[in-house]
Image (tube, coloured by chain):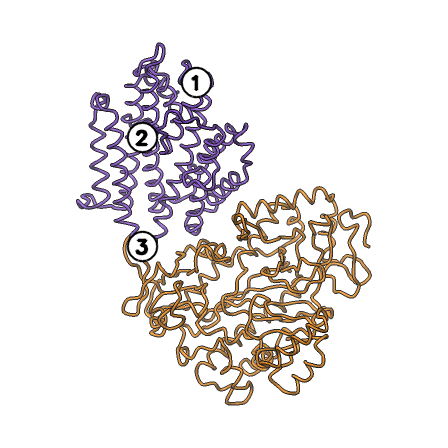
Amino acid sequence: MLARVANNLFWMGRYIERSEHIARYLRVNYFSSLDAPNQLSQSRQFVLRSMLTMIGETVEDESLILNEEDVLYKIGLDPNYTSSIINNVRSSRENANSARDLISTELYESINKFYHFISNYDAKVYSKNGLHDFTLNVTEMSAILRGKVRSTLMHDEIYAIIMMGANIERATQIIRIINAKHNDALKAQGSYGDKFKNSFEWTTLLKCTESYDMMRRFYKKTPNSISTLEFLILNPDCPRSIMNSLNQVCKHIKILDSNKKPSRNSTAFLVGKIRAEYEFKCIVQIENDIQSVIDNTLSSLYQISQKMEEEFFSY
Amino acid sequence: MVNLENQIFSSYQRNPVLFDEIFDERGQVKEVYSKLFNLYGEHSINDYVNLNEKAKSSFFNQGITFQVYDKKKTQEKIFPFDLFPRIIPPEEWKIIESGAIQRSRALNLFLWDIYHDKKIIKQGIVPMELISSSANYLDQMNNVDPPGGIYNHISGTDVIKHTDGQYYVLEDNIRCPSGVSYVICNRTALKRALFGVFNHYKTYSVTNYAENLLDLLETVKPKGVDVPNVVVITPGMFNSAFYEHSYLAKTMGVELVEGRDLFVENDFVYMKTIQGPQKVDVIYRRIDDAFIDPLEFRPDSSLGVPGLFAAYKKGNVTLANAPGTGVADDKAVYTYMPEIIRYYLNEEPILNNVHTYHCSRPKELKYVLNNIENLVIKPVDEAGGYGISIGNRLSKKEIEVVKAQILLSPRKYVAQPIMSLSVHPTYIDKSESFEQRHVDLRTFTVLGKDKEFVLKGGLTRVALKRGNLIVNSSQGGGSKDTWVLKT
């Protein structure tokens, strides 16, 4: 596979994954705030700020009043904002275009359909009453794409590259979502009858990652900070956990680099090292300093991505 | 007016002067179209409007689009596709197929000759100026032996049916003829929209093009290579034919590369992969001659590969088509095709050539200048329908401009009688009805070492503007699925 095309496929995987998480975050936060148990969580300004934090545009100024339609438009459909959902989907399609000869027709057509759906979506409808429909379609269509990747491509190095991209991005988005909700939980703790540990925001966090039902089944208890973070960071069986994503990354790097003992300077070595760190982490370590775990995870994922660039994509 | 019971054809206006592909001179449906005519007649215009929308979305979802730029944003458009297919009966196809092969073979021998001994010139069959003054003649190709002895691996022959019911060749395209992917997409789109009609006709498949192309490219591999590594090279994603390039690479199962993915070392060509460099043996190139190698041709080209031509001359890599083929699809060379076929193959031409007047010959120049209103004036070295003037569409003032242009450089122009392209019922969005539109046919021939293949089908191009004779997509043309019937 051409190095240039490999790079494009890696990013195709990332952009598809990214748009899905953003869309889900918008939907879950917006709709769960409508009947949230406390005043702060119910406040529209609080929710809009949380959305902006998640995509990396934290608003520091507490006195600023945000306009709902502007914020939703910016994150969803603004063609001039690089991180908007529409631009993520556009980029994933552009990357798919350049690798069209390598991926299946079925996968390509689905990406294309996805793109046309979004680029034809009426911006007015979207910010007035289409938020649910729009974001639900984005998550559904990304799920279809994931299915097509898995079931219509050969599980060879092309697949491995896409899966590496998707899983690195998934871990990145999950940790960003954790960061945003952790932030919200810290803010909400002063409110009536609500403490950080038992904040309503943990439930929202689980719903934002589509892990709520499974988490309830696993713990059989109302989510709190510890059980939620343990589930989303360390549980290898939770498909959205950091641990699970790292396992996937580890599995797919082996298709690209089949050395049993990868060299110290390789991506495979770095991935293995980082994965081991999480495998032997305990929740107690995380609980003591959540913020630095978040920061370290982001930086580790960034390192993996950089290393791949160096080893496989640059020439 | 025809058959009033047939709803969607009820307002079809038949101009008796034109050759209609489906109605005979009495307005009766021709035998071969009768079933199709009845099947389409079962639909109301409303059904048809829906089907048309369906077909459009099929093109959007397949990503077969091109970009249009306007002030605000770039828009994606599809090439117009008509749902009413064109049928070519087996006996007519036999003529087209054998004629296309004959022309491709003759052109290949001609190219070998003019880049080696130039016998055809020495014997006075074609004049020296024809070649020496051609912008597409490459001195660098003199005495270069292309692997397998093939120059024009892929040819696109443009054929029309005249009012006399006979097929004529308008053009041979042997540089980088495009359009074959549309043949296949048109079929896919028609099947998705109206699969039922296929039950009533035995039509040849068009999906075997890529496998034949790959087989062919493997026959012209460089010496000493066992299993050749074939690639397709494209100018990139923003090229209007990118869809076709990726389609061909995908269906052949080979890598689609850009110039920047390749490099040359010790006169061998390599591509940069995630596992390091990998040798390349056969390149199906969709980049024009001038851009393939900045060291040899245009130095400002960023699309090509430095050193590629040197590797080619050494015989270490095959280029398809070979550089310098453009000299033979020049419109002035076209006029000598009957002589060229007779000279190399000792056969009579199977397909007709349109009679051509050379403005470079004083006598013929005089005739052309006096009869412009009855002629089509074409520049000899332009592609894509650019620069063509149709005599009976020009005002007096415009005729004078054309005359002046011809006099300025007579070698640059040829003239032909105005051929009347046959017409085919075509659904027109605006009037929501079928109207007569002119069509041509581009066939695709591949030529390898001891192997040849013509795609059974082809691209029927439609001039969508009423009365327009120029069918090129760059000039607003559409296309139809084309059925070659089995005997």
Residues under numbered marks 2 and 1 in contact, where contact means CB atoms less than 8 Å apart: no
Q: For label 1, count other residues whose C-alpha is less than 10 Å away and answer few (under 14), some (14-19) or many (20+).
A: some
Q: Position of residue B416 (x, y in %)?
A: 66, 76
Which residue reaches farthest top? A193
On what subunit does the disc labeled 2 rest?
A: A
Q: Position of residue A20 (x, y in %)?
A: 42, 34
In screen coordinates, is A106 left or right of A261? right
Q: Is residue B458 visible?
A: no
Residue at disc 2, secondary structure: helix
On what subunit does the disc labeled 3 rest?
A: B
- Name the front one of labels 1 and 3: 1
Distance from disc 2 to disc 1, alpha carbons, whole Å, reads 23 Å
Q: Residue at x 70, y 73 (%)?
A: B397
Q: Colour of chain A?
A: purple
Which residue reaches farthest front? A63
Q: For label 2, count other residues whose C-alpha is less than 10 Å away and answer few (under 14), some (14-19) or many (20+).
A: many
- Residue assigned mark 3: B273
Colour orange, chain: B
**Quarter of image, res B323:** bottom left
Quadrant the C terminus of chain B occupies: bottom right
Residue at disc 3, secondary structure: strand
- Residue assigned mark 1: A42
Amino acid type assigned to the residue bearing label 2 in the image: Ile
